[in-house]
Amino acid sequence: MKRLIGAATALALMLPGAAVAQDTIKIGILVATEGAFAAGGADGIRNVELALKQVGNMAGGKKIETVVAPTDTTPATATRMARKLIEQDKVDIILGPLSGSEGIAMRDYAKTIPDKTVINGISGALETTWVDPAPNFFRFNLDGAQWGSGLGEYVVKKGWKKVASVSADYSFGYTNFLGFAVGFCKAGGELVERLWVPLGSSDYAGVIAKLPDDVDAIYLGMGGTDSINFLNQYQQAGGKAKLIGGSIMADPTVLSSKGKAKDALIGTPTSGWLANDNPAPEWQAYIKAYQEAFPADKRLPSPSLFGVGYHVNALAMIAALNEVKGDLSDGHKKFHAALSKLKVKTPLGEISLNENRQASGSVFVTEVSANADGTLSNKMVGRVDNVTQTLGMTADQFRAMGLPSRTTPDCKALGGK
Amino acid sequence: MSTLHNLSTRHPVGTIVILALVVGFAWLIFAPWPPGLEQVMGRKRVFLNAIFSGVTLGALYFLVASGFTLVFGLMRNVNLAHGSLYLLGGYIGYGVVDATGYWLLAFPVVFVVVGAVGLLLQHQVFRRMEGEELRQTLVTIGISIVLADLMLWYWGGQSYQVLSPQWLSGPITLPFVTGVRPNGQAVYLSYPLVRIAILFAAIVIGLAMWFVLNRSKLGMLIRAGVDDRDILAASGVRIQYVFLAVFAFGAGLAGIAGIIGGTFQSLSPGEDTRFLLASLVVVIVGGMGSIPGAALGAVIIGLAEQIGLVYAPTYSVVFTFLIMAVVLAFRPQGLLGGRR
């Protein structure tokens, strides 16, 4: 009898707990909060908060609970933190990561947890959704190669036909550079020299000395504090060449830094997934919501590429949860199907995925310009619509080019010099 | 001179090899390179720049690490909050320069403020746990985490650069030939002036420290304390005051290094651990507690980082730790560390 009462009590105690667990969905935000992209990571967290706040922390009729798992941009830490999210925090969905090589690690980790879901944060390496993609990894942002579209053609049109490059030596650095180089070489440009520097380097003096003098412009494919350190030392070394920026070189995280290093960027064309001054009403509404949600000293003047990525991916997650009414009980099968077919309304227009669960969309070419009050912002100078994962080529043509690396793409094979 | 003479008679081959290396290195730096060498090594400008950047980066590491090593040498405490003092100094320096516009003014202000923080740390924290190494280590890790979060709260996550003054910006021309134009005119190396100034300042501070340690009464006390703290205390010296002075000085130096680091690199959350790690490596390579060791270690690590970045970017991160591992394997007390 005693045992029976005990069992009943235990059951009674367990029941409400079980009911609560079903009413909440736990999200793990995997985001870099240390290293070169710390400021971008913080903006990512802000933007997930914003997306959840806009729906009152509810999706599919369930309460959304979040756990932040901080990483340091290395794949090893990302995997460790993801494992912690799944095994200890028991999250249902991982939202992240931020950095390219972390994304590749998450693709592989996602395969080991088929009945959970990984939705990308803003990582942009091509391989993540191109080489042997995981069926439960979804990326609603464009990848680094897509972000580079249009920039190469634009600078050749400006008359900058001879270019040397310095980029970060990891998967996103290669991918983002490939996007630029494909357009640049096809338009007849000449890549004189490609230099690669480790992610998170702080002293670039030696590399700056290596830059050739007789070029029209220098392509810089770095981000976060790496960009700032490079620009600071480039100015101190008396560098005066024209610059071309990769997609995170002149991001709001860089343009809002304190000091004059960023001034070297004035007039620098870059390209990416967003343009601050995009007149589209949904984009303007988003900027306004972002600026109202956080006090001015706790946010960037306008959302960064990192922040927008986390925001859009969070929006997609919310929309898909609404579609399946928060039902993840079948090992996420319905949820995966909903994500794959989703057409989600975002600040960047409607986004849907291809067969690799990778988004297509518009890319903006922008130029850094100085505002009247001395701050810098990106002004839109062009856009390319419907940029696909294969950059408008067929899958075979794209594959023939090889995966992004230090030496790929081959500029001559694409028609450049 | 006599030791040099002894060395050359005892190890004639080794001496010749070292002399040849020194002469060869001097030739690499001063002579214009023949085209064959340029094909193998790249342009001379690149090589010279890597060497100079390595030495100036070493100067910065030296400033951070010398305080660290001095404190360790005297008090045997490993202050793992040293990196936080560096970052704090940089942020305060930024504030001073931003408010007043005087770069040089930041140095005394930061030295005093961060030195005072050091005083507080020594007086309130370390004094209470003298000789308890594990406790000190854990407590300093804790302090560094708390300081890092406080700084993140106050200064935010974005990065800062300290504005260098007009008279230090831009490059200067140094009397090193990097190449010869077709018309026979020599091309000289142009190099950021601010880095030369930092190198110069580090040398002056290093020499001053050496003189104070080896030629002054305070230095005598410190050296005596390094060798045998208990006897020094027993002979009537108020050793706690010496500790306070040394700790404050080391902290102030880390703060000054923060301004310098903020001037030619940048300040952001995470820099504290980066510089803590750098000073640990420098001190392990150079020898715990030795100022000349810190200088040697700093230059070696700075050069390894820069030369690695230029000639083998993929492995540049590994070089630093490789050097540390080699030193630990063959000379565990560090290159200039004494046996204890």
Image (cartoon, rainbow, N blue to C red):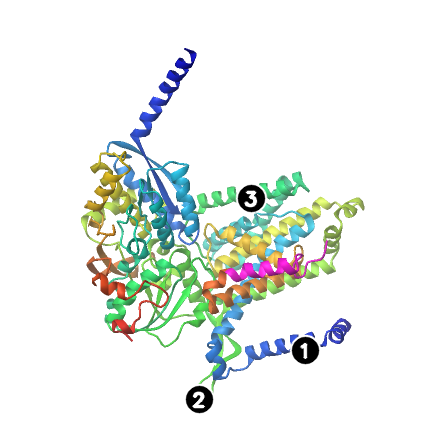
Q: Is residue B26 visible?
A: yes
- Chain letter for mark 2, please: B
- Chain letter for mark 1, please: B
Residue found at x 54% / y 65%: B304
Kind of residue at disc 3: Ile
Image coordinates for residue B270, horizontal then vertical, percent: 47, 50
Element carrying mark 3: helix
**Which stretch appears magenta?**
B318-340
- Chain letter for mark 3, please: B
Element carrying mark 2: loop
Q: Earlier in the sequence, mark 1 or mark 3?
A: 1
**Tag on residue B141?**
3
Label 1: few (<14), some or many (≥20) within 10 Å?
Answer: few
Q: Let me know if residue B327 is in the magenta part.
A: yes
Picture layout, residue A338 above or below residue A221: above
Q: Earlier in the sequence, mark 1 or mark 2?
A: 1
Label 2: few (<14), some or many (≥20) within 10 Å?
Answer: few
Which mark is nearer the camera, 2 or 3? 3
What distance separates the C-alpha of mark 1 from that of mark 2?
38 Å
Task: Say if labels 2 and 3 share a chain.
Answer: yes
Picture layout, residue B268 above or below residue A160: above
Q: Earlier in the sequence, mark 2 or mark 3?
A: 3
Q: Which residue is under mark 2?
A: B183
Image coordinates for residue B55, horizontal then vertical, percent: 56, 67
Snapshot quadrant of residue A382: bottom left
Residue found at x 51% / y 82%: B33
Residue found at x 34% / y 50%: A107
Identify which residue, A190 or A25, lies in the foreground.
A25
- Pointers 2 and 3 in contact (CB under 8 A)? no
